[in-house]
Image (cartoon, rainbow, N blue to C red):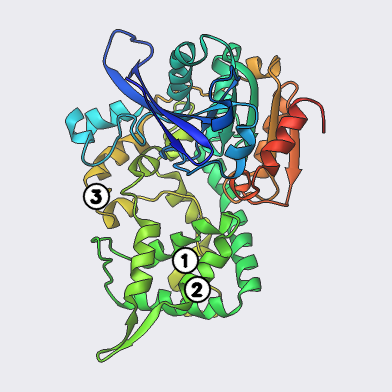
Amino acid sequence: MTLSYRQPGVVLTDRRFTVPLDHDHPRGEMIELYAREVVASDKAHQDLPWLLYLQGGPGFGADRSVGRPGWLGRALKEYRVLLLDQRGTGHSTPASRQTLPLRGGPAEQADYLTHFRADSIVRDCEAIRAQVTGGVPWTVLGQSFGGFCATSYLSLAPEGLATAVITGGLPSLDAHADDIYRAAFPRVERKVTAHYARYPQDAERARRIADHLLTHDVVLPNGYRLTVEAFQSLGIVLGTGDGTHRLHYLLEDAFARTPQGTTLSDAFLEQVQGMLSYARHPLYALIHESIYGQDARPTAWSAERVRAEFPQFDAAKALAGDEPLLFTGESIHPWMFDCDPALRPLRETADLLAARTDWTPLYDPARLAANDVPVVAAVFHDDMYVDTAHSLRTARAIRGLRTWVTDEFEHDGVRTGGGRVLDRLLALARNEA
């Protein structure tokens, strides 16, 4: 049964689908997918083309917006939009510490989670397209990891696409996770340096907080153990449009004076908890490195290993001298599964995924080289999350792909840019720009 309801300027419809867990075994176990259809109120009864939105992540459900903000408002001028909760996220058979034990032990959980990468997501989309569009190809908008999925879509089922629009999400076609992180840590260092140039007072504030964490056992209200490495990981926000400002406001209220002395404030700890906890998106932590697995080499906690190649990120060494404390970026580490109560029961499962050597290819270079689907991509200059050089190399490998390289926006430009980013890309796809 479908349920429709209204928000300002839009009509929403909840849609649910059943798809195979393993598309190679269509008569095996089934899982549920949830998607929210969105159409402009004044176009609710019109026959409109469809736009499928694939969220970034991995492991995040689709946007829960109100009305028609930003890119969605631009899309609704001409499309009926489907916001898909990718498998394992949102309402789509979620995967978490609470649900995964239904699969069995860590080995069974790890086997189950191998079916939650871009290739399975693409096959989900193709499985539901006939029910949504009647079989007509749709336009896909892929943001970040959603762009990785769109690239897999072009590799696996280009016949399902009328147009592919990618924002901040052109992946390397062949890089191992180690290559991804060796390129990432220098980018993160540049973002941190830029942050301290904007807010020089934050350098001392960050050192003071890190020194406190190195000498005190701090536990957040939800039971998360706040280590200095966890504090450094707050730098993940520096790749977003307002991230540098958010980090600044967080750091300026870190300490409170109490009868027992100066300590980290409740307000600071509460904010940090919301930023660090994976309770709302545990799948992100579990499969993040596996999105780069395409051969017999294990990912083997790549970010943790590669970080050791960049000693400037070692907090103790920085504090022992006069170097600034460096925050880190988008990377998953084994200590997160020790610190975060939402992840602790899944540590062995994560270890097993990190050790796997049977990853299958996610992209087909030959098919991409022969591509005939209109494809456009926004590449955000010095994107902290997706390497620009990798993206441009992939752009050259996909026949007919047109890029818009810009430093006007950060990685989340499709959201922060209102409808301008999507408008520019749709015009580019139609050879109007």
Q: How crowded is mark 2: few (under 14 residues within 10 Å), some or many (20 or more)?
A: some
Of pointers 1 and 3, the one earlier in the residue sequence: 1
Measured as percent of width and height from the top left, residue 245 is found at: 57, 67
Per the image, label 2 sits on a secondary structure element best described as: helix
Which quadrant holds the N terminus? top left
Of pointers 2 and 3, the one earlier in the residue sequence: 2
- Residue at (51%, 35%) from the top-left corner? 10
- Residue at (33%, 43%) from the top-left corner? 282
Q: Of the residues shown, which amino acid type is indicated by label 1?
A: Asp
Q: How crowded is mark 1: few (under 14 residues within 10 Å), some or many (20 or more)?
A: some
Q: 337 left or right of 400?
A: left
Per the image, label 3 sits on a secondary structure element best described as: helix
Up/down of 291 relative to 408, above or below: above
Q: Quadrant of residue 17?
A: top left
- Residue corresponding to mark 3: 344
Up/down of 108 relative to 49, above or below: below
- Cα distance between the residues tagged 2 and 3: 29 Å
Q: Do the residues labelled 1 and 2 touch (CB within 8 Å)?
A: yes
Q: Of the residues shown, which amino acid type is indicated by label 3?
A: Arg
Measured as percent of width and height from the top left, residue 349 is found at: 27, 38
Q: Of the residues shown, which amino acid type is indicated by label 2?
A: Ala
- Cα distance between the residues tagged 1 and 2: 6 Å
